[in-house]
Amino acid sequence: MITNEDNVLICPLCGSEYTHFIKWKKYYGKDGRLCVKLLFFCEEGHDFCIDFKQHEGFTIVSEEAV
């Protein structure tokens, strides 16, 4: 997860600190485990999400453009 030195979420596409939470979705991964996707937008017009996935006892966090 990309944050600045104050732990403020930064847009992974442009680095803007002005991000806004839109909604969350739950879904099931390929192995049937529950996953959560948090959707955001930044004030520069980019949409991105942060995914939380489970795999063999690990929680994997990833960001991606939407």
Image (tube, rainbow, N blue to C red):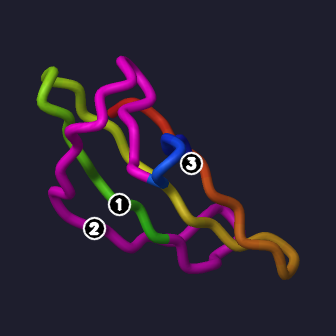
12 left or right, relative to 44: right
Q: Is residue 58 above or below residue 52?
A: below
Q: Residue at x 38, y 73 (%)?
A: 26
Q: Which residues are magenta?
A: 8-35
Disc 3: which residue? 1
Residue at 24 percent of width and 34 percent of height:
47
What kind of element bears circle 3?
Answer: loop
The tag on residue 38 is: 1
**Marked residue nearer the N-terminal end (1 or 3):** 3
Single out the mark in the foreground, 3 or 2: 3
Real-space CA distance between mark 1 and mark 2, rounded to the nearest whole angstrom: 4 Å
* Secondary structure type for disc 2: strand
Mark linked to residue 24: 2
Q: CA distance from mark 1 to mark 3?
A: 12 Å
Three-letter amino acid code at the position of disc 2: Trp
Decide whether residue 30 is among the magenta residues: yes
Number of marks = 3
Q: Position of residue 43 (x, y in %)?
A: 12, 30
Front residue of 1 and 60 = 1
Q: In the structure shown, which secondary structural element does the residue marked by tag 1 occupy?
A: strand
| Residue at point 33%, 38% (across, down) | 48
- For the view shown, which residue lies furthest in the front direction? 6
User: Which one is earlier in the sequence, the residue at label 3 or at label 2?
Assistant: 3
* Mark 1 vs 3: CB contact within 8 A: no
Magenta-drawn stretch contains 57: no
In the image, residue 50 above or below residue 13:
below
Q: Position of residue 15 (x, y in %)?
A: 39, 24
What percent of the width, then of the height, locates residue 53? 63, 66
In front of the other: 45 or 26: 45
